[in-house]
Image: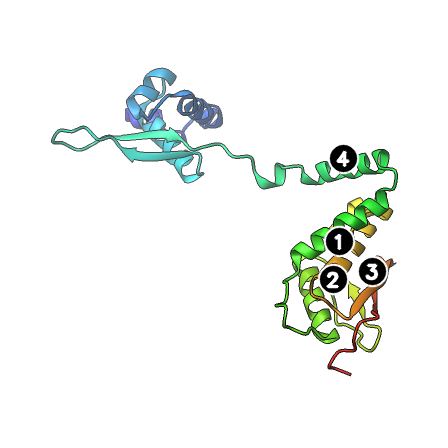
Amino acid sequence: MTESTLHDPAGPDAGATGESRGHVLDILRSASGTVGVREIAEQTGLHANTVRFHLDTLVGEGLAERSNEALGRPGRPRAVYCATATRTPADRRSYQLLAHMLTGLAAESLEHPAQAAATTGEAWGRYLADTPSPAQHVTAEESVIRLSRVLEDAGFAPGPVDGGTAPVIPLRHCPFLELAEGHRDIVCSLHLGIMRGALKEVRAPLRVDRLEPFVAPSLCVAHLARTDGPEDDAD
């Protein structure tokens, strides 16, 4: 039996593989620069072949990077390693928790939280909508298309519009459902404001008359109405 077999991580000491690999990774992360196999072997007491095995695995998992050391002299450069930059996975960023905290703060601190939410939503609705040129006349039909585009981009999954003089837009998904369950007045007012702001920004001959939240478990309905402005070209 050869020495490399005795120290093979797949051999009798395989149960300690995870711990040994973690030790190798700790060395890479604490190093001020790149580290070679020999240095790691000396610090861990592991065989060089075992260190290479762990390093190859870490590189494959994206936890380490391999490069060739520039020696400035003839000969084959040795491979050196360093830990990759640590990043917090996206699914561990608690944006939802932050949203709950801020919504609760608004509910407790503002005198009229629903009104403030509607005003904020309107400002954002104007920002999210594509502003038509000053010379462009936007019809009711085009207004609904532009509003639906804003809602689609925001995650509301708007369905087919029931047209006519008072269009109805079904919203098949609430991107803030968990928040709406606890603070419906604030969240739904925010949604209403977004739609009203978007229609104002495109100079639509329509306005959002009302928003019916949760007419079904996964459905809200926005009711639009004519403004007092000029009639559009579609009629």
| Numbered label attached to residue 101 | 4
Residue type pointed to by label 4: Met
| Numbered label attached to residue 220 | 3
Its colouring scheme is rainbow
Sequence-first disc among 4 and 1? 4
- Viewport quadrant of the N terminus: top left
Judge the density around disc 3: few (<14), some (14-19), many (≥20) Cα neighbours within 10 Å. many
Spatial separation of the CA atoms under disc 4 and disc 3: 24 Å
Residue 183 can be seen, yes or no: no
Residue type pointed to by label 3: Cys
Residue type pointed to by label 1: Glu
Sequence-first disc among 4 and 3? 4
Residue marked by disc 1: 122
Spatial separation of the CA atoms under disc 4 and disc 1: 22 Å
130 on left or right of 13? right
Sequence-first disc among 4 and 2? 4
Sequence-first disc among 1 and 2? 1
Residue 151 can be seen, yes or no: yes
At a point 49% along the width and 32% down the height, the residue shown is 86
Spatial separation of the CA atoms under disc 2 and disc 3: 21 Å
59 on left or right of 68? right
| Percent x, y of residue 72 | 16, 29
Quarter residue 49 falls in: top left
135 on left or right of 20? right
Point out the frontmost of discs 4 and 2: 2
Q: Is residue 71 above or below residue 209?
A: above
Determine whether the residue tagged by mark 3 lies in a helix, strand or loop.
Answer: strand
Whether residues under marks 1 and 2 lie with C-beta atoms below 8 angstroms apart, the answer is: yes
Q: Is residue 206 above or below residue 65?
A: below
